[in-house]
Image (cartoon, helix red, strand yellow):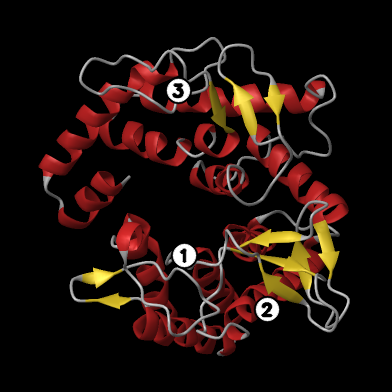
């Protein structure tokens, strides 16, 4: 994806050449009985790691935009065809119920590469998030066809989200997304943008206004995860209704850190584009200033280990690194919010 983006912006064919070379080297990953890509592959010889027989729905379902664009740019349909097999697999599983594992368009997050068996629970956070994101975006990328398996999966998943995973906090009435543990990950903050984009682009239907309003309410919750933190930065996850008198608390002790994630600011960008409401710019600026205060290092930006403690330093030990998505997504959306 990065190579194709560089080619689009620069027009330099070396980026397209390298993107095709990488795509060719990745093709053996799709040689599984289910058609789901093996997440572990030796690029030098195309061998998959023999013990890696499972993948997440997010990994299997987040290749289609990039491989589709690679086919479009090279004129070779094999890349798009290989990646599309995953959506065909998931559609069949949704229709069959996958032996009772798939309900209301929601999939358990882990799936076997050989037999296609599911395990785990549905999630719009880690291991599940981008699977649902790509359903709508793939439908948009291919021209919004009326008869579409990915569109059917998207609408089913959103209905499942609203009926099974949507909750309201007891103190302030904040809407949030979680399973039975009342735990919402920052990763799930992509959902407000997805809902808003879906409400704006899908054909008119009764749920449209309710889904857009839900998008705005969930975006507010995501911003509150930042605003109520001592550092102005959201933790990796929060737990709702854990402490009397408080909507949520940071998920101690294992999810206190801030990893420069883009999900909330992407949602703010989409909602600002669709509504023109200046509060989303203000929210983005709040996050930008907090990043500057707490995550700046001499040669870039890094993770903050505990957002509840302003005295903690960023970029120490394993946190002394800048994730690629910070430049590719977080800073991009923060910039576009103010553009």
Q: Number of marks in the image? A: 3
Q: CA distance from mark 3 to mark 1?
A: 26 Å
Looking at marks 2 and 3 on the same chain, the residue that comes earlier in the sequence is marked by 3
Give the quadrant of the N terminus: top left
> Marks 2 and 3, how far apart in space?
37 Å
The alpha-carbon separation of the residues under discs 2 and 1 comes to 16 Å
20 vs 175, nearest the viewer = 175
Secondary element at image label 3 = loop
Dot 2: element: helix
Q: First in sequence, mark 2 or 1: give its number.
A: 2
SS class, disc 1: loop
Instruction: Decide: few, some or many residues near mark 3? Use Cα within 10 Å; few <14, some 14-19, many ≥20.
Output: many
Residue at the disc numbered 3: 38
Residue 213 pos. (x, y %) = 76, 73
Which image quarter holds the C terminus? bottom left
Q: Which residue is mark 2?
A: 220
User: Quadrant of the rendered structure where residue 289 is?
Assistant: bottom left
Answer whether residue 148 is visible to the viewer in this image.
no
Q: Nearer the viewer, residue 68 or 146?
A: 68
Residue 306 visible in the displayed image: yes
Q: Is residue 206 above or below residue 286?
A: above
Taking 192 as reference, is 305 left or right? left
Q: Residue at x 36, y 64 (%)?
A: 326
Report x, y in % for residue 255: 57, 61
Residue 262 numbered tag: 1
Q: Residue at x 58, y 89 (%)?
A: 279
């Amino acid at each position: 994806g990065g190579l194709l983006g560089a080619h689009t912006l620069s027009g330099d064919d070396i980026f397209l050449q390298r993107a095709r070379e990488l795509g060719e080297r990745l093709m053996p990953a799709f040689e599984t009985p289910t058609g789901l890509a093996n997440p572990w592959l030796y690029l030098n010889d195309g061998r998959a790691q023999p013990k890696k027989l499972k993948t997440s729905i997010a990994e299997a379902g987040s290749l289609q935009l990039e491989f589709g664009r690679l086919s479009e740019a090279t004129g070779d349909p094999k890349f798009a065809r290989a990646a599309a097999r995953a959506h065909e697999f998931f559609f069949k599983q949704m229709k069959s119920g996958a032996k009772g594992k798939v309900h209301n368009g929601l999939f358990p997050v882990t799936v076997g590469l050989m037999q296609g068996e599911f395990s785990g629970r549905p999630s719009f956070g880690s291991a599940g998030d981008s699977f649902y994101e790509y359903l709508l975006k793939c439908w948009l990328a291919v021209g919004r066809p009326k008869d579409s398996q990915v569109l059917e999966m998207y609408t089913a998943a959103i209905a499942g989200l609203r009926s099974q995973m949507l909750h309201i906090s007891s103190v302030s009435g904040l809407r949030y997304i979680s399973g039975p543990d009342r735990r919402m990950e920052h990763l799930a903050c992509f959902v407000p943008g997805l809902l808003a984009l879906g409400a704006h682009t899908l054909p008119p239907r009764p749920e449209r206004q309710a889904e857009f309003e839900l998008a705005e309410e969930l975006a507010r919750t995501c911003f509150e995860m930042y605003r109520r933190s001592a550092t102005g930065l959201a933790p990796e996850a929060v737990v709702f209704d854990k402490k009397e008198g408080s909507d949520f608390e940071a998920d101690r002790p294992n999810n206190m850190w801030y990893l420069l994630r883009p999900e909330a600011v992407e949602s703010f960008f989409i909602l600002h584009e669709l509504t023109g409401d200046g509060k989303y710019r203000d929210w983005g600026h709040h996050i930008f200033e907090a990043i500057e205060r707490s995550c700046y290092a001499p040669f870039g930006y890094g993770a903050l280990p505990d957002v509840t403690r302003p005295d903690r330093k960023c970029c120490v030990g394993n946190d002394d690194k800048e994730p690629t998505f910070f430049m590719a997504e977080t800073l991009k959306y923060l910039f576009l919010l103010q553009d």
